[in-house]
Image: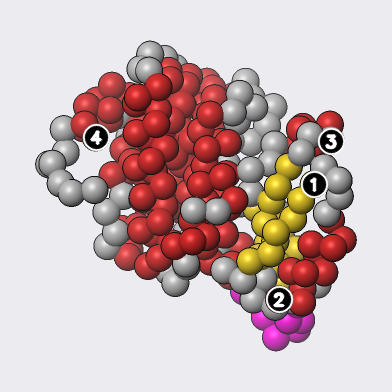
Amino acid sequence: MLVNAAKGVENNTLMRMEEVVADVLRERFVPRYATLSGPSFALEVAKGDPTAIVAASSDRAASELIQRSLSSSSFRVYTNTDVVGVELGGAVKNVVAIAAGVVRGLGFGTNAGAAMITRGLAEMTRLALTQGARAETMAGLAGLGDLVLTCTGELSRNRYVGIELGRGRKLAEILGEMREVAEGVKTTRSVYELGKRLGIEMPITANIYALLYQDKPAIEAASELMGRPLKRE
């Protein structure tokens, strides 16, 4: 059995982690594959704080085995068969977390933060459903749950990058002083390109991509999002 704990979409290939594993191993070994995701800062897990995550696998027996093996009095594991939705939720939420950080760095209040999380969830769901995911997965631990944590938690590396960008600092300077990886920086490129390939409207991702890779000012990105044509929710 192979259990994946990485969150992201590979640059250039635009593969999810399940697809990367299948591409690397090919016919030599076809494992029972599962992926772990959900709102779980490692520091809090290590401290024994109550945490709930999801183990997703197309093989129900595999996810149930992981559930039994990893669950404890402070670590609750749910099962899910929607690997696509769980993996895309875990990837895209890091992009939205950068955007939520930018909102904070620009000095905007909680109205703007709540709007960013909610519209980010809509963007994440559009992409996932196009790839065959289920809507209920995006409302669960690997979707909304992980999104809320990463967009609001003080331990979020991606949110931190966004805050500093919103304050006007350059990306290279921010990353140069960090000891940990902000996965959303590279994932933004992959998610942006995947959305373009599939013809999906992803305005938050597009503006974060422009902010990270085209030196678009943060206030200009915020103004563009607010100035988009009015529409139904």
Magenta segment includes 66: no
Rendering coords of residue 6 (x, y %): 66, 53
Q: Residue furthest left?
A: 229
Label 4 or label 2, whichever lies nearer to me, is 2
In this view of the protein, which residue sits in the foreground, 96 or 71? 71
Kindly state the secondary structure of the residue where label 3 is placed.
loop
Q: Main secondary structure of the magenta part?
A: helix
Q: Check residue 60 in the rendering and tell me which mark sits there, or answer none.
A: 2
Label 4 or label 1, whichever lies nearer to me, is 1
Give how far apart the Cα atoms at labels 2 and 1 are.
20 Å
Give the residue drawn at x 51%, y 33%.
151
Q: Check residue 75 in the rendering and tell me which mark sits there, or answer none.
A: 1
- The answer to whether 120 appears left or right of 3 in the picture is left
Q: Amino acid at mark 4?
A: Leu
| Circle 3/circle 4 CB separation < 8 Å | no
Rendering coords of residue 29 (x, y %): 76, 81
Give how far apart the Cα atoms at labels 3 and 4 are.
40 Å
Kindly state the secondary structure of the residue where label 2 is placed.
helix
Give the residue drawn at x 52%, y 20%.
173
Instruction: Specify the segment rendered in magenta.
Output: 21-31
Identify residue for label 4: 225
Q: Is residue 15 visible?
A: no
Q: Amino acid at mark 3?
A: Gly
| Circle 4/circle 2 CB separation < 8 Å | no
In this view of the protein, which residue sits in the foreground, 142 or 27? 142
Give how far apart the Cα atoms at labels 4 and 1 are.
38 Å
Give how far apart the Cα atoms at labels 4 and 2 are.
41 Å
In this view of the protein, which residue sits in the foreground, 198 or 135? 135
